[in-house]
Amino acid sequence: MATNVFANTVTVQGTIKTPGTYKAEENMSIITALFKLGGGSAKRAFKFAIVGGATGEVIEEYRFDTVVNTLDVEEPTIMGFDIGSCVVNTIRILTTYNYQKHGNVACLKELSEALTEMCDVDGEVSFEQFKALVEKAKEAAGEENKALIRPIVSALAVFPDEFMEHCDMKYCAGSCCETMYRTPCANACPADVDLPGTFALLQMGKPIESVALGRNDNPFLLTCGRICEDLPCQKFCLRQIIDKPVYTRSLHKYAGVKAAELAGSLDAALDYPALRPTTKTGKRVAVVGAGPAGLTCAYFLGRYGHEVVVYEAMSVGGGMMRVGIPDYRLPVELLNAEIDHICKMGVEIKYNMAMGKDFTLQQLRDEYDAVFVAIGAFKANRLNLPGDGSADIVTAVDFLYAGNLKREWPGLGKSVFVIGGGNVAVDCARVAWRLGADDIVMSCREEYHRMPATVDEIHHTEEEGIKIYPSYTPLDVNKDGDKYIVRIQKLPTRPEGEWRWDDPIPGEILEFKVDTVIAAIGQYADIDMLKEQGLEVTPRRTLKADFHTFETPMEGVFGGGDCVLSPRTAIEAVGTGKRAADTIHKYLCPGAKTGFPSMRKLMNNYVGEFTMKEAEQQLSYVDEVADRRDFHEAEQPYTDEQAFLEMKRCICSAKTGLRRMGE
Amino acid sequence: MKPKTILKIRKLVQFLFFVFFLVFCAGAVCAFNINETGVFACTLGALEVIIGSGTIYASLLITGAIMLVLTILVGRVFCSWICPFGAVIDYLELLIKRIHLKRADKLKANAVINPKTKYGVLIGTLAAAGIAKRPVFCAICPIGNTCRAAGMQGVMIGLETLFVPLFAGLSFIKERFWCRYLCPVGAVLALTDKLSVLRVKLPADTCIRCKRCENACPMGVNPWTKTHKRVKEDPAVIAALVENGTPDVLYRPIAFSTLPAEVADVVTATAKKGCKIPGGECIRCYECAAACPILNEGFTEKVDVVEEAAISA
Ligand SMILES: Cc1cc2nc3c(=O)[nH]c(=O)nc-3n(C[C@H](O)[C@H](O)[C@H](O)COP(=O)(O)OP(=O)(O)OC[C@H]3O[C@@H](n4cnc5c(N)ncnc54)[C@H](O)[C@@H]3O)c2cc1C
Ligand code: SF4
Ligand code: SF4
Ligand code: SF4
């Protein structure tokens, strides 16, 4: 056992706020080093850390409570990496460095070359070859040079998927390996929307084509233009080299508005000829669930020429986007226009048909050539609190369903208590306000700045007079006549980076007397029904499916969306639907090519204008708070002037990127 | 001067030379006519004649050296500023762009054939001159044929003029196909260009990685990969990155002002040397630099919108 290198000082480095060398604490964990000494991540959440410098060990985020002196490393340094980092590229650089410094021991030269190939789109190292090479290096290194390949060995153990994606799929999740994608934003978008292309077409004054180019990849482009939150494309946007990212979502919203204006109606604007299917394969596919995942899969299968029937349990399409996301954020007409367009691809939606009730999976498997299951996460977690009112707590799913479809909740009353701190909770509170409640209180266990809801949403919530009590845990709910008494107790503030809570602070209890209590504490898929149908489920209460191909263990059955991923975002559901459609197409027509002809020729060799000016704002709520109290869309689109400034801010607009896709 | 302006000047100069060669100089500048007018030849023509005849003509040595000296002084400018066949190819390119032809992947240098093929053509040309005892290549040389096609002495279209559209037409496969893969004159100049002093420069440390330059280059030089990507792989830069604990920071969208100082210094120092496009394949056409938003608009982190609005108001 080596001596404790962390006995005196520790150097904290990486994408953190205050890098530097500090006095080491006794039994210091990675959390302490990165958060307390390093000030936390500079921008985004951590993904992994390397303890011990260039010969250190890779530790993934959920093991950050590891005490560093239990690790047998040589240097007292800890590097933090946030989620924008590519593990393979990082390891490649470390390996090249080690090779430069120590010469060709432990196959470092070969490893460095192999990693360089893996980070290049033309590289031809397969994952198997790489693993074999690492094994060989382990032998060559022996005990004395073990440290030199420790980063590779530990990274391969922790992130095998990422290495596999680089070798065999040529995909870099961190948008670091430049030859593998056209632009970082399109690479980060789960649906691969060609964002620079859409902006270039907008610059050229062709909004209809711009929307069509985007919808070539994402049938819910305009919907996502309203509701995409936590935008993956913006996080990787190159514009951050200069100032703030390009406000991608707002531009797609603008494109939709302009296209509808130009074509006369939204339906006419969406129906772009090049998107229509050209062939018929005669194969039939059933899709269960008309949410974004199911409908996206149906859209692409329709365009591949298959006949698709979508079975939907409810009487409306769109899934959570229709019954969960309130109409003031996403107008129904817009969602319906996109769904109608999907139906034009040879897709039929059968409403009021629930799997497990009206039909079984086996029936679908007998009747169709393939089945795609995307039933979303419609089961709400129940809050089991003490107290006789606990059974009456309304779940967010039920409440929003009624709020969206019927615009009422019997017995809502004037005062409402919402438990939860995510976007769903925020939606509940804001819907309650629009349904007539005046005195609305939200509470959540997270600290204010660590609430999962987005900053904008929290801001709007507060504007609408909703009070938020962060760092409180609910104690009990008791009946008091018609009313309920909710008691919440203060939690101590957690140190940064710590995700476990200590016991609540004794005595600091608040009491509220309200008409309705709503709990928005997460949803999960109907796994009992899935099990009944013979599908496998995971301990995470999701449907078991491969995360790259979306095949389930059952032959001919595929799964995607929230029921596979656990509740995430609409665009991720769209992405799974798209990937699954490709696999299903290959499954039905072996040897067939996936993907559709590029529409980039629309751009006519346009190069794109560029400006150095800084963005003004994402989008503005021009409506006064008092005018917002119904379900009309409150967020206004860009004016022409704002939009043109914004689209010229896009650095990569038009003909750029190291890799050309199908042009 | 902004590269965009340089590009405009280049196009003008190229046009003037085109007119000059076509109208006034028909045939007079070429080894093809060596027996009649005798004094002037391009470098390749001079070599051919000297090898073919086994005699060293002083006049040819001088005229042949003009292009070499030019190249050493200012680079392989002949191909994009002077060459009349280059102009033909550039004008054809405008047409090809218009019809949106799907061509071989532009960003792969070796996508069609190896660019070194032209050195093979060069050796073949010289060998043929030696065997046939006369400059045979000059008969099919599209550059000379362009010069001879028309002029003060009237249109002189002969069978060999067909080589002009034939070789120019290769552009339908890939941009500047002839120049990139086949031209033996280009081959001589490419070899000379390795010694040249002046190089096209891309912005040193302020590249915003848009890769417009990479896409603009008609010669498949991959200017960005040859400069900024190389800088990132420089041993000194890698060492600075790793020792500073931010190995992948240059691969991420991070503002220069937030780069750690130790890294920024090394990167700037390396980029100052490394942002020059290597000589050889580069024909100094300035397409890349003219496409670069940073070189043309100037880099300003955080332009103050309020201030600009006040000025325009
Ligand atoms: C309140 C709320 C707000 C949200 N806000 C946002 C946001 O702003 N931005 C964002 O990106 N994401 C948001 N989301 C998440 C997003 O809506 C979901 O991630 C997305 O809709 C998941 O898509 P899906 O296709 O997997 O499932 P779902 O949209 O849940 O669709 C599943 C469909 O399957 C149907 N179904 C269920 N069971 C059966 C059965 N047995 N037989 C047949 N059909 C069945 C359902 O009726 C439903 O139509 C929000 C979610 C909620 C709840
Ligand atoms: S500048 Fe434009 S194309 Fe480039 S990453 Fe940002 S949004 Fe995407
Ligand atoms: S100047 Fe630039 S664009 Fe022109 S050949 Fe050289 S590298 Fe290519
Ligand atoms: S065009 Fe300029 S800014 Fe863009 S990648 Fe090339 S050098 Fe960098």
Image (cartoon, coloured by chain):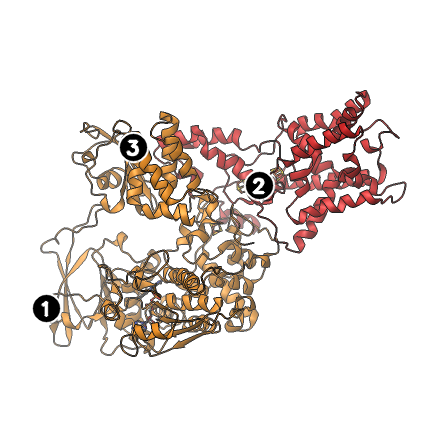
Chain colours: A orange, B red
Dot 2 lies on which element?
A: loop
Q: Residue A7 got which mark?
A: none
Check the residue under mark 2 and report the chain it is in.
B
The foreground one among A164 and A7 is A164
Q: Horizontally, is A518 left or right of A270 in the view?
A: left
Q: Residue A139 got which mark?
A: 3
Alpha-carbon span between mark 1 and mark 3: 63 Å
Q: Which residue is mark 2?
A: B110
Dot 3 lies on which element?
A: helix
How busy is the neighbourhood of tag 1: few (under 14 within 10 Å), some, or many (20 plus)? some
How busy is the neighbourhood of tag 2: few (under 14 within 10 Å), some, or many (20 plus)? few
Across and down, in percent, residue A610 comes to 55, 49
The foreground one among B286 and A132 is A132
Q: Which residue is mark 1?
A: A387
Alpha-carbon span between mark 1 and mark 2: 74 Å
Task: Establish if A270 lies above or below A350.
Answer: above
- Point 48% across, 42% down: residue: B301
Do the residues indicated by labels 1 and 3 lie within the same chain of the protein?
A: yes
